[in-house]
Amino acid sequence: MHWRSTLAAVLGLTLVAGTTSAAVAQEAQHWPPKQPVIGQPKTEHGCARIEKSLPTLKDWPKVESQLTGDRKDEARIKAILKDMTLAEKVGQMTQPEIGAITAADVTTYGFGSVLNGGGSWPGAKKNATPQEWLALADAYFEASKQTRTKIPVIWGIDAVHGNNNVYGATVFPHNIGLGAAQDPCLIRDINEATAEQIRATGQDWAFSPTLAVVQDDRWGRTYEGFSEDPRITRAYGYEAIKGLQDNAKKRIGEDGVIATAKHFIGDGGTTGGKDQGINASSEKDMINVHGQGYYGALAAGAQTVMISFNSWTNDVIAEGKVHGSKYVQTGILKGKMGFDGLLVGDWNGHGQVPGCTNASCAAAINAGLDILMVPNDWKALITNTIAQVESGEIPMARIDDAVTRILRVKLRAGVFEAKKPSLREHAGDAKALQHKELAREAVRESAVLLKNDKRVLPLSKRSKVLVVGKSADNIGNQTGGWTLSWQGTGNTNADFPNATSILKGIQDTLGAANVTFAETAEGVDPAQFDAVIAVIGETPYAEGVGDLGKRSFESARLQPQDLAVLDKVSGKGKPVITVYVGGRALYMNKEINRSDAFVAAWLPGSEGGGIADLLIKGRHNGFSGKLSYSWPGEACPALPGEPAKKPLFKLGYGLRDWETGRVGTLDETSPGVLCSGGGGGTATEDLEIFNRTDIAPYQSMIGSAENWGGTVVGPDGQASHAEINVVQSDVNVQQDALKTTWTGTGPGQVYLQSPAVSDLRGYGNANAAIQFDVIVHQAPANRTVISSHCQYPCMAEIDATQAFRNLPVGQKSTVKIPVSCFSNKGLDLESVNTPFLVYTDGAFQASFANIRWVPKAGADPDALPCT
């Protein structure tokens, strides 16, 4: 991160000063150097040890896997492969989504695997029972056995903190919290439990663990990484794989499932923390920082690796999207590292490779991808891939290598000899879905105590407390993204029948009579209680949506009511204990100043009682968590070229109950929502308005005669009037766009608006543009305008009717409009509250995505005219 000390110092990546020419000559005598080899790690308490330091590697090491399989497997694979047709082989390489196929399709096309995305359940039922999950698993399995080859299908699922897609299952803390526990044995136990949960509902394959070594907390997937410290990620990667795969050496036992090391490679190191962005690391840093988790995971026997969405590009490396990089997939992973399992793509990740689409990508297969995750466009992909092999664009040897690896993993997983899923170990077992005590232990180990003035914690068991804050009784907030739904949104406490909120945990510990809950702190007097517990923080998000972009660490999904609640209860003569629930370390000086004690609970999952165990004196050992991510001391990260900013709390910081921390009064100076781009200077970064979701402070809305004041587009991406409606759609990636339909029954508008004005004079230069991606589904029937407002009626607009009509229907286009088009027509850039609006009164349908103001868009011959 720009504001944390470099990891190079920790890892010894800097060359020692004074290296002599004699030393260089001595090294040259041993050229070429021996390839480094990594085997089983050193252990402590029976689990992988978190090393004090790691050796600096000059090249990608060969990793010796503990899972070698049966030597008879290879002969069996050759016999199966020899008898397969090209169509059958391509079917094994194709992975569709359960919502887009039937069991009959499995028989017809011979799919090798299926997946369900986050928020996808059997019959589209969020509360589907284990029996309903098993019934679908049986249907797919039996359908695969009806194919000519009888090769069993396997089902992969994003079980990233327990079997989190399944109603009623115990949900463990997200990885950011587990990293703070610094307990590799706990990681093995949790993944063993997760494997049981997956077996209970009939899946074969877990798309976990995530091994990102996150370097910029602006990334919306920060909480999926264990730590910014590769030492922790390496040890944890080893134990996570051993837990999921039942410590397999020849075959994965009936207590295990196939594990996935993901996402290879560099997803946690993208510039600016941009999801699916560019990692500009040197190869040395990619080896010694971002690669460490894979050394642990592959040594433990990981059978699958998922390729990452990000690109890898710097002055030397020009790999671009790693989904299309032969060097990354074949040269590094399969070649130098010696990985003999299968490589699976991410959700339509192959479609992002230059020259490819979701339905066609010879480049990704030739690079080394063995299974293409193609949720919906699978039929066209199969047709195109077969044609590409027949034409010679994809060598048959590459297809045979891919299918060999798929069959190898299936043999090692034991699925050829397995019964149907409902008859396997743990199938339908309600106890297998419940691991409440283990999860509660994980919550206790994960929470980090950052401040404890006058040792107010732990509270007496006889305390009478006031509990406030939006996350105290909100299990959706405490479980976060990747829980029941993809983004973790749309959930209520009723969706978690076996869970315990933090409030309920406090009530169970102190007795309900001694606990008063007032979410907003209205109508209560803190002086009437022994202490106040405020539970605040972020609301759920997952990939893409959670990115901060240029927003400050202060504004990151923290709601204004959090500080308002603390203002109501602090300074009233009673201690205030603040519990922060969220997916990353944030700039929270104001909140910490208003708190006598401050606890980072991260995203603790379904067992909120673990937090009560720490806050209230009892039989447990108290706080032991240590930060696995350093905590920002300033609201904005350093820009490229600026010196790193000093963290408020360093990596490894964490108090025990008897420590106070001596935090003192912190500076509360902050820039507000945005870190740069406003005021009279020149903007240097894009101002994101909408990127998969609204970018604070902007909110997407629709307006018409039904409500010109504006109807907010909900977290599900939907809003509807008679004249205009909006739903989610795909333009660049999954659910990244507002698909807007004007019905032709009257005027309507879709727009993004801030409750306050922004000073955008920084975008007043000649090269700046308002830019967005769009797919026109139906050209506009009547005059259509794009406008920006400086608090209506202060506004400016351009006529975009013909421009939209000229765009190819059904294809993505990128539109640029010079900001000068608006400023020259009267838009006051110092007072913009609505930076983007589309209005028409006739029928029109288009999907809008990636809406932003770009300071250096440059001259564009396709830019819309200022008419």
Image (tube, grey):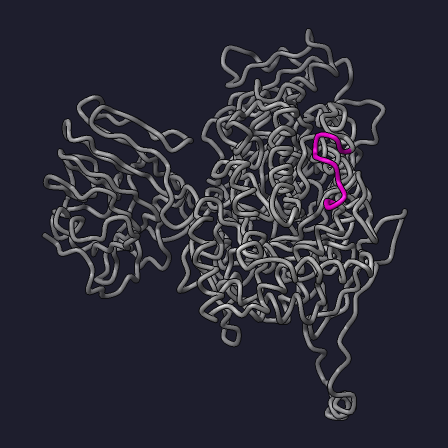
Question: Quick one: quadrant of the N terminus?
Answer: bottom right
Seen from this angle, which residue lies furthest top?
Answer: 513
User: In the figure, is residue 158 to the left or right of 236?
Assistant: left
Q: Compared with residue 657, is residue 399 higher up or lower down, i.e. above or below?
A: below
Q: Residue at x 71, y 40 (%)?
A: 661
Q: Is residue 249 visible from the viewing direction of this image?
A: yes
- Residue 241 x, y percent position in the rendering: 75, 49
Magenta span of residues: 415-424
**In the foreground, 285 or 732:** 732
The residue closer to the viewer here, 439 or 643, is 439
Question: What main secondary structure does the magenta stretch of the protein show?
Answer: loop
Residue 249 in the image, given as x and y percentages of width and height: 83, 53
Q: Residue at x 61, y 25 (%)?
A: 132
In this rendering, the count of numbered labels is 0
Residue 238, given in percent of the width and then of the height, sits at 77, 52
Rendered location of residue 802, percent (x, y): 12, 50
Q: Evaluate whether residue 164 shows in this view.
A: no
Q: Nearer the viewer, residue 429 or 77?
A: 77
Left or right side of 389 for 206: right
**Was residue 686 drawn as part of the magenta stretch in this picture?**
no
Identify the residue shown where x is 14% and y is 44%.
796
Name which residue lies at 22% across and 53% down: 808
